[in-house]
Amino acid sequence: MYRNIVFDLGGVVVDYDPHTFLLERFFDEAVESKVHEIVFGSKEWRQLDAGEITRAEANAVMLEKAREAGCLFEVQSVLDDWMRTLKTRRKTVEIIKRLKKMGFSIYYLSNIAQDTLEELKKRDFWPLFEGGVASCEAGTNKPDARIYELLITKYLLDRTETIFVDDNKLNANAAYELGITGIHYKGGPAFIRALNACGIPIKEHLLW
């Protein structure tokens, strides 16, 4: 019997789709690819998530790379504006509320930088979480097994009673390898069907 459901944040509870954001901003796949490599796909972004460098340090390196690549203006505009894309997914929040009413304990496990985490902690959905682990505080990112084990140990969770939901298939699979039921999030209706397959009855038509 499942008792705990753990949610990734970006791409599940809040919007996070850098490729779409960049394409809609620049309308140019070549520019999108270049900026993505410098920002969201960079070593510095992963270091930010792992809490190894500050936002100021990461931005300085990214902007220097952008200057060398001839796209300083584009990268600066993205760094100034990207966080506004983290819109709360209200239907996901509604599912979490229903799960809470059914008696499930709700946690988060997310690759996330410290300043982004602090922003999300201001959202009205944050009190729904019993707790969680952020990569910036753990010092490592998913799919490293250590971050999953930290969550399990910190909250004394039984992994056989725990579901982990992530929009990144590698991260969901990593949970599965550790004995946690991993659900690859591919949108609300598919998520509800996955929950139903796990014996958790939520009616799709009430939400979509």
Image (tube, rainbow, N blue to C red):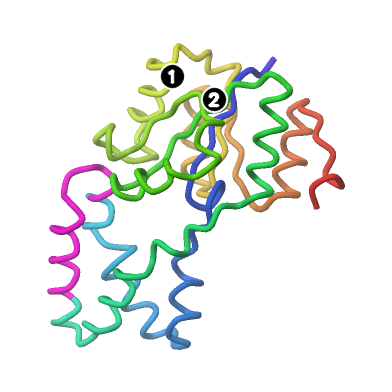
Identity of the residue drawn at 69% across and 41% down: 94
Q: Quadrant of residue 122?
A: top left
In the rendered picture of this protein, how many numbered marks are placed on residues?
Answer: 2
Please tell me which residue lies in front, 170 or 129: 129
Identify the residue shown where x is 72% and y is 38%.
Answer: 194
Q: How far from the left and from the top, in percent, is residue 193?
A: 77, 41
- The magenta-colored residue range is 48-65
**Left or right of 157 in this view: 112:** left
Queried whether the magenta region covers residue 54, the answer comes back as yes
Tag of residue 152 = 1
User: Which mark, residue 180?
Assistant: 2
Task: Decide: is 13 above or below 79.
Answer: above
Query: What residue is rendered at 53% in x and 52% in y?
Result: 14
How would you classify the magenta stretch by its main secondary structure?
Answer: helix
Q: CA distance from mark 2 to mark 1?
A: 10 Å
Q: Position of residue 172 (x, y in %)?
A: 52, 39
Q: Is residue 182 above or below residue 21?
A: above
Mark 2 touching mark 1, by CB under 8 A?
yes
Q: Residues within 10 Å of mark 2 (few under 14, many from 20)?
A: many
Residue 43: % across, % down = 23, 57
Left or right, 81 with reference to 128: left
Foreground pick, 65 / 59: 59
Labelled disc at residue 188: none
Q: Earlier in the sequence, mark 2 or mark 1?
A: 1
Side of 76 where 172 appears, left or right = right
Question: Where in the figure is residue 89, as x and y percent of width and height?
Answer: 61, 52
Question: Does the magenta-highlighted stretch encompass residue 163?
Answer: no
Q: Amino acid at mark 1?
A: Ile
